[in-house]
Image (cartoon, helix red, strand yellow):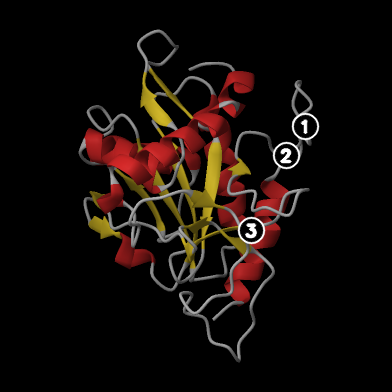
Amino acid sequence: MSTKKTNYSYIGIAFILLVFGIIFIPKIINRIKGGDVTRTESRSKNVSINAEGYVSDLMFLEINGEPKKVPPFSFVNQNGKTITNKDFEGKVYVVEFFFTTCPSICPRMNRNLVQIQNTFSDFEDFGVASFTINPDYDTQEILKTYAEKYGINNPNWHLMTGDKEVVYALANVGFNIYAGENPNVEGGFEHSGNFALIDKNGFMRSRKDDFGNPKIFYKGIISEEEKEDEDGETEEISLLKEDIAKLLKED
């Protein structure tokens, strides 16, 4: 695995992959017909939210003027059960891409996610979707052992494995979270240490950055206790917790 500093540069790679995916792989993105990416706030008729209910100030990632929705997926989880995007309907959830033999950032990411899990342990409508980028090794049995090791006990936290190419397409195009094989780095794979946040209706959400655009992702490597890393990057787990709480209030 490459260094954390290199890891943060994958956000830029993700944007390039996003544009590539829009042009060449339109079918994998829900309701995408090709074109440019825009990042503006939306409260449009395309978002199914009860007008009389609570609506948070979190933004939507827009593609061609429409809020981006999680594409369909189907994988097997740590308990041998087939899990699809429909299993997360009506739930607020965090998305990550990882692998169990990751020697660097994955343990930190999952310790942070366990902390988030414990924070929202009383909420039946909160979950986590963890997709392995090394499905050849990370079988259902391996994922189950990993879940037990880290204290993953939320029934809505699914560690999923499946076809490698489908996983990579979901990461790089579906969620724009970089993942790929690289025999030249420690562990043999490289990926972003970022988390995506999904609302109850399946839309990608985030808070604004300093320029009024959606941040899109949340840094998953730095813990709340650390506050920042040696490169001066600040933690965003506390921000993610705040935004999860906002989405849980939405209808």
What type is the residue that disc 3 sits on?
Thr
Q: Is residue 69 above or below residue 230?
A: below
152 vs 63, nearest the viewer? 63
Dot 2 and dot 1 residues touching (CB under 8 Å): yes
Q: Which mark is residue 235?
A: 2
Mark 1: secondary structure:
loop
The secondary element bearing badge 2 is classed as: loop
Residue 218, image quadrant: top right
Say which of 74 and 102 sits in front: 74
Q: Position of residue 150 (x, y in %)?
A: 49, 40
* Disc on the earlier residue, 2 or 3: 3
Mark 2 or mark 1: whose residue is earlier in sequence: 1
Neighbourhood count class around disc 2 (C-alpha, 10 Å): few under 14, some 14–19, many 20 upward? many
Q: Label 3: which residue?
A: 119
Query: Which residue sits at x=75%, y=22%?
Result: 231
Rendered-image quadrant of the C terminus = bottom right
Q: Where in the figure is residue 119, as x and y percent of width and height?
A: 64, 58
The numbered dot on residue 99 is: none
52 in relation to 83, above or below: below
Q: Nearer the viewer, residue 93 or 137?
A: 93
